Every structure is written in C-alpha cells, then in structure tokens.
Amino acid sequence: NAGVTQTPKFQVLKTGQSMTLQCAQDMNHEYMSWYRQDPGMGLRLIHYSVGAGITDQGEVPNGYNVSRSTTEDFPLRLLSAAPSQTSVYFCASSRLPGRGAVYGYTFGSGTRLTVV
Amino acid sequence: TQLLEQSPQFLSIQEGENLTVYCNSSSVFSSLQWYRQEPGEGPVLLVTVVTGGEVKKLKRLTFQFGDARKDSSLHITAAQPGDTGLYLCAGAEGAQKLVFGQGTRLTINP
C-alpha cells in the first residue's frame, strides 16, 4: 500500500522562484491537508480540502496556493519562494467523519524545502 | 485557532524509567489524538480518545483524556530505546481539522 506519496523529498529554491509540491493518496480519502513543521512550533495547517473542487485556508496560508481537481491529488504551490518558507512540509489525508467521530490522519514522509 | 500546549518539550531518561507527557488547552475538543514521529518520517497515529475521562492502553503506553476534554496525558511504563521519538498531541477542530501541539521530543538512553 502506497498511502500518501509526497515528491520531491528535498528541494532547494532561490528566493523568488516558484515550485509545486506534489501529494497523492491511493486510499480514496475525501479529506486532504498540508502542514508545515518548524522547530518548536509543531505542525501548522496551511490549506485543506474536504473533496474534489473544495479547498479552504488554514492557519498559515499566505504565499501558498492549492487546488483539488481529483480525489487523489492535492498539490501545494509556492508562488514566489521566501526564506521564511524554509520548512518541512507534510501532506496528510483521512476519511471524513461520520456522526461524532474523527479519523486519524495518514501522513506522507515530507518534503524538506530550503529557500536561499 | 485553539491552542494545545505540550510539556515537557524535551525529555531524556534512562531505559526502564516511567514518564508522563502532558497536553493542555483552555478549549474543549471533541476528540484528541496522539501521534509519534521518527526522524525523516511523517507522524503516525497512536490513538484517538473521544470521551471525557477515557483511558486507552497500547502495550506500555497509557493515554487519558481529561474529564472536561481540555487536556490529555501519555504515560509510558518501563521506557525502551524504541520509544524514542517526537510525540504530538492533536485536537479536533471542526469536522476534521486537527490542531497540533508543539511536540515532546523523547530520548530513551540505553
């Protein structure tokens, strides 16, 4: 089982460059999300989606765009990279809950991004 | 966004000792999850607690959800080097959004 696949694993960008972080899941999960992880700050939500064609902003959305054209894919685009976007990025997916329940997330193995 | 505070942020103990990690908030959560993360990997779900006062056990790990559903604890008995990792608590906000604590980095020394 592939689960959640993120590419690339490592990336170095120059300030001002753009790029897309890829995320794909094969579990038919409706919910997908992007987090960034910085030392001492845990995981902070960037954007999330509850299904194809539906996206919404999380806690730290500035400088990032997302789209969800299929259930499987949820790419994260950096429009003009800045050093403050140096971080480890994680994509996660889950089923949407039924009444009174929440499901655990399945995470990808992350993309380590450095902006110089 | 609701906040979750974990303590301690760092913990280094000897193999065989017991330890407790705390996850606290001023807000009520409908459920709370604990994850463990190893270097270079994404977090992996350990447990979900839903009911106030609920206690769940996973081998040597015991998880408790506070009666008021504002806090949780993770207790490890007879810690082993394989328990080393970053432990994250996460509270459910809305339908499926999770807000994460900053994590507790645990090191078990042989």
Image (cartoon, coloured by chain):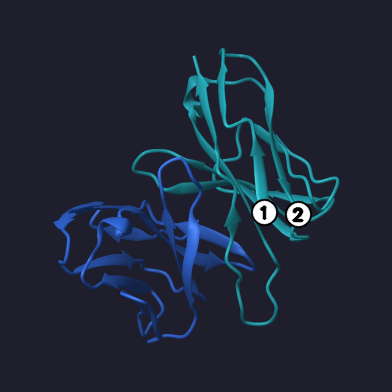
Chain colours: A cyan, B blue
SS at badge 1: loop
Name the amino acid, label 1.
Answer: Gly
Q: Is residue A116 left or right of residue B73?
A: right
Q: Which of the 4 quarters of the picture holds residue A18? A: top right
Pointer 2 chain: A
Q: Residue at x 74, y 59 (%)?
A: A27
- Residue at mark 2: A26
Query: Which quarter of the rendering shows the C terminus of chain B?
Result: bottom left
Instruction: Return the disc, 1 or 2, that comes first in the chain's sequence.
Output: 1
SS at badge 2: loop
Image disc number at residue A3: 1
Q: Quick one: B1 or A5, which is closer to the camera? A: A5
Q: Which of the 4 quarters of the picture holds residue B53? A: bottom left
On the image, the x and y values in percent for residue A17 come to: 64, 15
Pointer 1 chain: A
Whether tag 1 and tag 2 are in contact, CB under 8 A, the answer is: yes
Badge 1 density bin: few <14, some 14–19, many ≥20, Cα 10 Å? some
Q: How far separated are the C-alphas under marks 1 and 2?
A: 6 Å
On the image, the x and y values in percent for residue B13 come to: 15, 57
On the image, the x and y values in percent for residue B71 come to: 35, 73
Up-down: is A15 above or below A40?
above
